[in-house]
Amino acid sequence: MQYAILVMLFLGLAVLPSTAEITIKEKAVDKTANSITVVDEVGRTVTVDLPIQKIISTDYRQMEVLLALGARDMIVGVDNTFHKRMPYFGLKDVADVGIHSQEVNYEQVLALQPDLVIIPARQGATADEISEKLKGVPVLAMGLASRDHIVPETQIMGELLDKEDEASSSTG
């Protein structure tokens, strides 16, 4: 079943307009060997230290892209809806860190010591408020579940996770 979903995701990406190259150049501001600076979905400029080893996603829909890129071993926290709606991905031992689109358990997130937290554009609190409470942890608002954002933001995730080839083959 999980492979059928990934195939549908990739097929959906193949029919999207190919404007991703322009958008990714606008979103990836600067990349060095030690960090990457990107503009997230809500217009914030965020610098993320590289390499990323631990990721938290507070939107279950972002997980499909992360898993398609091969980031399974990096995922240390998800929203509670992921376990309910997508148990077939086999990440039952990954911690719940929030209630989908409502709130984030900041203590749990900090205890997991992530290198990156990915949130949807609307997560109860704003991206700035979440970032303020997670001092020192980069927080990116991404629309990995939105058709308009999935291609360029999948490519950004490829850059962030050192999985550019996987992102390119995923987005055609």
Image (tube, rainbow, N blue to C red):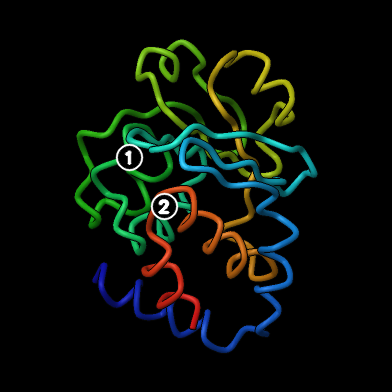
Give the residue at the far bottom of this rendering: 15
Q: In the current view of this chain or complex, which residue is farthest to the front?
A: 33
Quarter that holds the N terminus? bottom left
Q: In the rendered structure, which disc, 2 or 1, sits on the residue that comes first in sequence?
A: 2
Q: Is 118 left or right of 29, judged from the image as shown?
A: left
Q: CA distance from mark 2 to mark 1?
A: 9 Å
Q: Tag 2: residue type? A: Met
Circle on res. 108: none
> Dot 1, crowdedness within 10 Å: few (<14), some or many (≥20)?
many
- Say above or below: 99 vs 122: above
- Residue at 43% x, 42% y: name it: 81
Residue at the spot x=20%, y=34% of the render?
93
Q: Residue 69 sits in which quadrant?
A: bottom left
The label shown at residue 63 is: 2
Q: Looking at the picture, how far across and down is residue 153, in whole percent?
A: 59, 59
Q: Are marks 2 and 1 in contact (CB under 8 Å)?
A: yes
> Disc 2 or disc 1, which is closer to the eye?
1
Which type of secondary structure does the marked residue at label 1 adopt? strand
Instruction: Classify mark 2: helix, strand or loop.
Output: helix
Q: Which residue is mark 1?
A: 75
Q: Is residue 79 left or right of residue 44?
A: left
